[in-house]
Image (cartoon, grey):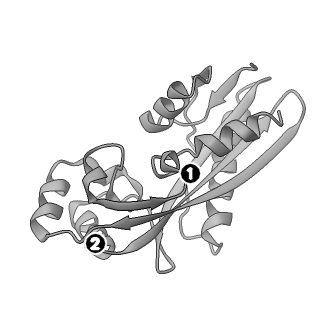
């Protein structure tokens, strides 16, 4: 397989690729995300993933660059990383007992063949009703502060999920099934 360069320092994306047996190296992007751009969630995550991949591609002469970005969407609201405990509590209360989407965009830039491809994948997530105490205890762990939608399904928030429709790895930041199919095109 060709050299793949992951334009992300995300431990989740790293684990997903490793678990799938993909050989890759890591070169995190320093691209600044702008979640306020007036685009649909699908277009936004593809745009942001392309920005990350292009940032890293500028530092390499060959290889296949993979950039990715995920957001949580609830009733047309985009929920990125809360960064503060107060915002995390607010987001989790909003999602409690409700259905939302996790949308991940990924971009592959083939530096050897001058080919670029972006895709977006959505997964439906149904949360159980959460008590204030459950939310407060979870937020106190610090885990949700740097996670889109204020939760990490692959960690302690798994217990909040009632049902998933679609790719579970997409919720963790990379729809591996779709990515592996797309890699065949390269």
Which quadrant, please, contains the N terminus?
top right
Which quadrant, please, contains the C terminus?
top right
Q: Nearer the viewer, mark 1 or mark 2?
A: 2
8 to the left or right of 186: left
Identify the residue shown where x is 27% and y is 59%.
160
Vertical position of residue 134 compared to residue 145: above or below: below
Identify the residue shown where x is 50% and y is 47%.
173
The answer to whether residue 142 is seen in the rendering is yes
Local crowd at mark 2 within 10 Å, few (<14), some, or many (≥20)?
some
The answer to which of 80 and 154 lies nearer the viewer is: 154
Vertical position of residue 105 compared to residue 89: above or below: above
Taking the view exactly as shown, the residue that stands out farthest to the left is 133
Residue identified by numbered label 1: 69
Vertical position of residue 6 compared to residue 129: above or below: above
The answer to whether residue 32 is seen in the rendering is no
130 to the left or right of 58: left
Between discs 1 and 2, the one toward the N terminus:
1
Residue identified by numbered label 2: 96
Local crowd at mark 1 within 10 Å, few (<14), some, or many (≥20)?
many
Q: What is the distance, in whole Å, between disc 1 and disc 2 at their CAs?
A: 23 Å
The answer to which of 46 and 96 lies nearer the viewer is: 96
14 to the left or right of 22: left
Q: Quadrant of residue 115?
A: top right
Taking the view exactly as shown, the residue that stands out farthest to the right is 113
């Amino acid at each position: 397989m060709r050299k793949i360069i992951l334009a992300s320092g995300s431990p989740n994306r790293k684990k997903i690729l490793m678990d799938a047996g993909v050989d890759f190296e890591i070169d995190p992007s320093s691209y600044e995300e702008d979640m306020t751009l007036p685009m649909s969630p699908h277009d936004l995550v593809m745009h942001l993933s392309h920005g990350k991949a292009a940032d890293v591609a500028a530092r390499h002469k060959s290889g296949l660059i993979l950039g990715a970005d995920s957001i949580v969407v609830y009733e047309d609201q985009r929920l990125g990383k809360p960064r503060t405990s107060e915002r995390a509590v607010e987001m989790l209360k909003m999602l409690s007992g409700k259905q939302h989407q996790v949308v991940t965009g990924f971009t592959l830039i083939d530096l050897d063949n001058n080919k670029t491809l972006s895709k977006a994948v959505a997964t439906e997530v149904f949360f159980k009703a959460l008590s204030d105490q459950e939310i407060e205890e979870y937020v106190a762990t610090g885990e949700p502060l740097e996670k889109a939608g204020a939760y990490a399904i692959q960690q302690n928030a798994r217990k909040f999920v009632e049902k998933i429709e679609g790719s579970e790895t997409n919720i963790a930041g990379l729809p591996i099934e779709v990515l592996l199919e797309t890699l065949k095109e390269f």
